[in-house]
Amino acid sequence: MTSDAGTLRNTHQRRAVSSLLGSVEGFHSAQELHSMLRDRGERVGLTTVYRTLQSLADAGEIDVMRPPGGEHLYRRCSQGHHHHLVCRSCGSTVEVEGPAVENWADRVAEKHGFTDVSHTLEIFGTCQGCCRS
Amino acid sequence: MTSDAGTLRNTHQRRAVSSLLGSVEGFHSAQELHSMLRDRGERVGLTTVYRTLQSLADAGEIDVMRPPGGEHLYRRCSQGHHHHLVCRSCGSTVEVEGPAVENWADRVAEKHGFTDVSHTLEIFGTCQGCCRS
DNA sequence: GCGTTTTTGACAATCAATTTCATTGTCGGC
DNA sequence: GCCGACAATGAAATTGATTGTCAAAAACGC
Ligand SMILES: [Zn+2]
Ligand SMILES: [Zn+2]
Ligand SMILES: [Zn+2]
Ligand SMILES: [Zn+2]
């Protein structure tokens, strides 16, 4: 379904995208990442940026966030299941974990007879830096 | 900011959309609702369906769900803050509440100095009816 | 009714994301 | 080191949901 990971070829473009994701802070859209690559002098097509981000996300190497009314945002995150606390104003992000939440979600789903359970959870707010009005 | 709620006029179209939402089960997209209205013989433009859903959502009268990779889905739900447990296969929905989750989200945001906190949370799974493979 | 103001809706525009498809690049095998 | 099968690329075209436009129609206070 996902990973013919063995057949993935090691291309200049994939390395460029992957390396860029390793060197930037916070979440960025495909289009932003594409222009960053242009600025760096890398020649990578927008389509390829989309495709590479897709495959990295499928492989679990990056996280995807879908803010209300905006384009998809991508970021290289730490391993393992976690969620994001995001500033609505500047976009700065904190990774948060909550075993209690994970358990609650699974339990409530089981209680209703659901299997193969997953969930999405994002917390939005205004960070300290953006708070001074 | 939002609500000149007093100036909203009582039109045939708004009544049609609102009434439809009261009589259908589960979440539906704007386009689905639009064709349902056509099937019912109501004459409502797609643009108006979008606008009406938007304002109903702004007014908190309906819930909006944004499933991964799909269009926005709308549904008239019960009052108050809750979340949704949704079947990935048939779309059937259960409303769930979790005070513990709400508290956790607020606390973790405060701990990181975030204010004006909100969150989104959806649980996905396969319901009993869809489970027989 | 009348006039004002909101609402409607056909159509155009937007815009992220995907598809197409001819060209290019990888890489295992020789 | 070269070949050839096949994955990967990317420019351009396409999709498809959603939003903007604006003239015409409907609602409502009087
Ligand atoms: Zn901030
Ligand atoms: Zn989780
Ligand atoms: Zn189901
Ligand atoms: Zn909640």
Image (spheres, coloured by chain):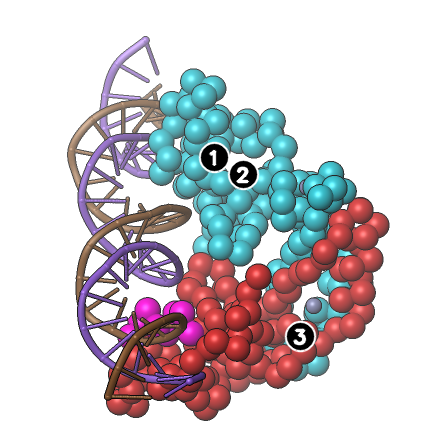
Chain colours: A cyan, B red, C brown, D purple
- Residue sitting at 37 percent across and 74 percent down? B49
Snapshot quadrant of residue A47:
top left
Name the spot of residue D8 as percent of width and height, x first: 37, 34
> Can residue A64 be seen in this snapshot?
yes
Please tell me which residue lies in front, A6 or C16.
C16
Q: Which mark is residue A28?
A: 2
Q: Quadrant of the N terminus of chain A?
A: bottom left
Measured in 3D between alpha carbons, the distance from the residue under mark 3 to the one under mark 1, in whole angstroms, is 34 Å
Measured in 3D between alpha carbons, the distance from the residue under mark 2 to the one under mark 3, in whole angstroms, is 30 Å
Mark 3 lies within 8 Å of ligand 4 (Cβ measured): yes
Answer yes or no: do the residues labelled 3 and 1 have beta carbons within 8 Å?
A: no
Residue B117 lies, with reference to residue A126, above or below; the image says: below
Residue with the mark numbered 1 = A32
Q: What is the count of numbered marks?
A: 3
- Residue sitting at 78 percent across and 59 percent down? B106
Residue with the mark numbered 3 = B82
Answer yes or no: do the residues labelled 2 and 1 have beta carbons within 8 Å?
A: yes
Magenta region: which residues? B45-52
Residue D25 lies left or right of residue B108; in this view the side is: left
Residue B95 lies, with reference to residue A76, above or below; the image says: below
Q: In the rendered structure, the residue with mark 2 lies on which chain? A: A
- Residue sitting at 54 percent across and 38 percent down? A28
The kind of residue tagged 3 is His
